[in-house]
């Protein structure tokens, strides 16, 4: 009997299988719980047309209400507390001294970002190089400048003239062309060098992780085609690695922008330095000046974030079937969807979101 099928086991004495009739809607077997008959007079069609009631989330609504109350209270203090002095904020926001400090901040950040990215590529290549000397020196550089605080690097460079009154280039232990350190390296140059030296150590690790993220099959295919090593890196490896490098490195640029405020401690009047000096000159305006610095840093980081989004979208080509929509495209799509949404009738069921 163990080899017989279910149809054969259910067959009657004549060898023909007995087929059970389909269960009626009111039958107890229709509900899956035998022995528990349904009450008579149930309209199953009416039950099927009843709308689906979404699941309630009372705790979520309570938390949302508390957060909104706290947010509204904070916003109220922004406009009702006279200590903020918003009229002075508008006066200082576009003051010539503030704009000059903002210009210095942008200049130092832009130069340091370019130098640190190019230097990070060089150090990253040395880090993954098969040459033990280059690999060791690159690792030591990353270890040193990731361990030393940036403010210490800047102060050390600012006092470089005491350690080396002159700097020169020439034959080691032979004739050299020497110039005064203070003349060659200005305050801006020292600030950019300090920011770049510290940032190269971090960008090198970002670039190295992006290179290692490229599939090994790409390297093998490029070598099999006989492509030169330099062209393999510039045309095949680096473009694919940028897909992983860009998001992390843009975060580094935002950190670099905020770290440029430390240039104030090496006598460079960037945005933060100007605010500090004006706060010492006008002590009653210290709060409005700090608000002005906050606004400008928010604007700069927002612009960098927008640029990051479009760069990521550009390098996403080839990795996704459809490029992610831009904010403007999302807004237009949302408006179009709202305008085309049909009205829900009371007797129609609704989906639970």
Image: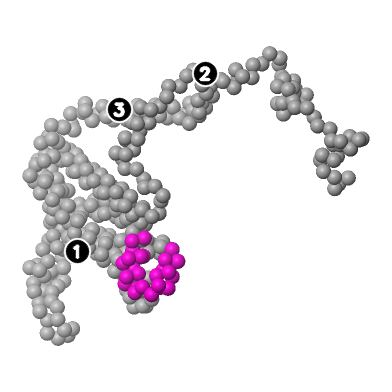
Residue 57: image x %, image y %? 49, 28
The residue under the point 60% across, 17% down is: 46
Res 63 visible: yes
Disc number placed over residue 285 in the picture, else none: none
Q: Quadrant of residue 44?
A: top right
Where disc 1 sits, the SS reads helix
Dot 2 corresponds to which residue? 347
Query: Is 50 in the magenta?
Result: no
CA–CA distance in space, label 3 to label 2: 42 Å
The span picked out in magenta is: 215-240
When the figure is inspected, residue 344 is found, relative to residue 131, above or below; the finding is: above
- The crowd level at tag 2 (other Cα within 10 Å; few <14, some 14-19, many 20+) is few
Q: Quadrant of residue 170?
A: bottom left
Q: Quadrant of residue 220?
A: bottom left
Residue 184: image x %, image y %? 10, 68
Q: Nearer the viewer, residue 190 or 129?
A: 129
The residue mark sitting in front, 2 or 1, is 2
Position of the N terminus, as image quadrant, is top right
When the figure is inspected, residue 276 is found, relative to residue 61, above or below; the finding is: below
The residue under the point 32% across, 39% down is: 329
Disc number placed over residue 193 in the picture, else none: 1
Dot 3 corresponds to which residue? 73
């Amino acid at each position: 009997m163990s080899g017989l099928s279910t149809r054969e086991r259910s067959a009657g004495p004549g060898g023909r299988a007995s087929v059970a009739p389909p269960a009626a809607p009111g039958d107890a077997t229709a509900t899956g719980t035998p022995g528990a008959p349904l009450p008579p007079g149930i309209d199953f069609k009416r039950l099927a047309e009843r709308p689906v009631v979404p699941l309630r989330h009372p705790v979520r609504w309570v938390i949302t209400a508390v957060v909104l109350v706290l947010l509204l209270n904070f916003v109220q203090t922004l406009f009702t507390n006279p200590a903020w002095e918003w009229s002075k904020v508008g006066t200082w926001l576009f003051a010539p001294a503030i704009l000059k400090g903002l210009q210095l901040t942008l200049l130092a950040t832009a130069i340091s970002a370019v130098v640190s990215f190019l230097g990070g590529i060089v150090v990253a290549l040395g880090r993954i190089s098969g040459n033990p000397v280059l690999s060791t020196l690159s690792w030591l550089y990353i270890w040193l400048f990731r361990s030393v605080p940036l403010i210490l690097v800047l102060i050390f460079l600012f006092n470089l003239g005491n350690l080396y009154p002159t700097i020169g280039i020439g034959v080691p232990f032979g004739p050299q062309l020497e110039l005064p350190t203070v003349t060659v390296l200005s305050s801006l140059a020292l600030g950019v060098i300090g920011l770049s030296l510290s940032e190269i150590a971090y960008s090198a690790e970002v670039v190295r992780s992006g290179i290692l993220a490229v599939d090994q099959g790409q390297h093998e295919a490029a070598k099999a085609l006989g492509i030169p090593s330099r062209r393999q890196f510039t045309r095949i490896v680096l473009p694919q690695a940028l897909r992983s490098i860009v998001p992390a490195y843009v975060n580094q640029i935002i950190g670099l922008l905020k770290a440029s405020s430390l240039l104030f401690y090496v006598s460079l009047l960037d945005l933060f330095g100007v605010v500090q000096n004006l706060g010492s000159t006008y002590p009653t305006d210290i709060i409005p000046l700090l608000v002005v610095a906050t606004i400008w840093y928010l604007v700069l980081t927002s612009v960098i974030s927008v640029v990051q989004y479009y760069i990521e979208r550009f390098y996403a080509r080839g990795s996704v079937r459809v490029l992610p929509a831009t904010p403007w495209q999302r807004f237009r799509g949302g408006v179009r969807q709202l305008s085309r949404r049909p009205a829900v009738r009371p007797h129609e069921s609704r989906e639970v979101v």
